[in-house]
Image (tube, rainbow, N blue to C red):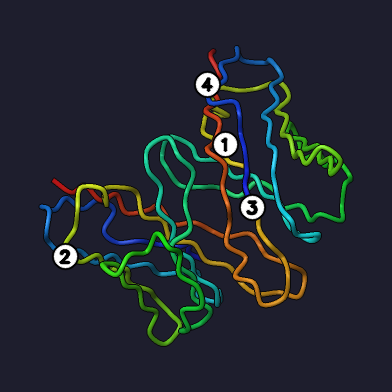
Amino acid sequence: DTGVSQDPRHKITKRGQNVTFRCDPISEHNRLYWYRQTLGQGPEFLTYFQNEAQLEKSRLLSDRFSAERPKGSFSTLEIQRTEQGDSAMYLCASSHTSGQGPNEQFFGPGTRLTVL
Amino acid sequence: AQKVTQAQTEISVVEKEDVTLDCVYETRDTTYYLFWYKQPPSGELVFLIRRNSFDEQNEISGRYSWNFQKSTSSFNFTITASQVVDSAVYFCALSEARGGATNKLIFGTGTLLAVQP
């Protein structure tokens, strides 16, 4: 069974450009999360999907950010008009639902975004 | 509001020493889950343990052990006989557990463990 994959692994862009990241979760996992991690900090929650429905968005997710999960499979995170403050590692995680509380989330390798 | 505090920013030990990583959490929920993750230099977060708020038994897995104390809102992690391969950033995290919740993880700022040979 393959783990969570993310593409690209690195992205360098100029301020004002749009970028899109992709996450492929573990195939049977219905829950998908996006987090952002800056240097020296723990990951911070951005948004959550259960199947194809986006059920929660953090206030960190400004209107320049949009995420989708069509058909409840892979997910994309788009950042429009990037700013230098968007530079971070963007992490995707997936888990499955059980009747016994939150299961462990499996994380992908992340996409490191650098905005020049 | 939920919060996780890892007061130790960096710890350096010599191989074979025991080391304890501290984690203190805050939550108003009566049911919640606690996690530890390891982030090695390669960057990918690796799950280590999940513990629910009703289970205060300590857990041991090989050289790893965890001490959960609700009275002090702490969930500390001990590595016995540390090895160079244990060098990583370790994160403690908290998740709500009520029905319909997203179960998002609230992470601490992490503790960088450096094990010297």
> Mark 3 = which residue?
B2
Which mark sits nearer the N-terminus, 4 or 3? 3
Neighbour tally class for label 1: few under 14, some 14-19, many 20 plus, Cα within 10 Å: many
Mark 2 neighbour class, 10 Å CA radius: few under 14, some 14 to 19, many 20 or more: some
In terms of sequence position, does the residue under pointer 4 or pointer 1 come before the other? 1
Q: Position of residue A67 (x, y in %)?
A: 35, 73
Q: Which residue is mark 1?
A: B90
Chain of the residue under the numbered disc 4 shown in the image? B
Q: Which residue is at a point 71% across and 19% down the rendered structure image? A: B18
Percent x, y of residue A54: 46, 79
In the rendering, at what x and y percent does residue B84 appear? 55, 22
Q: Which callout, 4 or 2, points to the residue nearer the camera? A: 2
Rounded to the nearest angstrom, the CA distance separating label 4 from label 1 is: 11 Å
Q: Is residue A108 left or right of residue B115?
A: left
Is label 1 in a helix, a strand or a loop? strand
Number of residues whose C-alpha sits closer than 10 Å to that of mark 3, classed few (under 14), some (14–19) or many (20 or more): some
For disc 1, the chain is B
Q: Are marks 4 and 1 on the same chain?
A: yes
- Badge 3 sits on which subunit? B
Does dot 4 land on a helix, a strand or a loop?
Answer: strand
Residue at 62% from the left image edge and 65% from the top image edge: B103
Residue A93 relative to residue B94: left or right? left
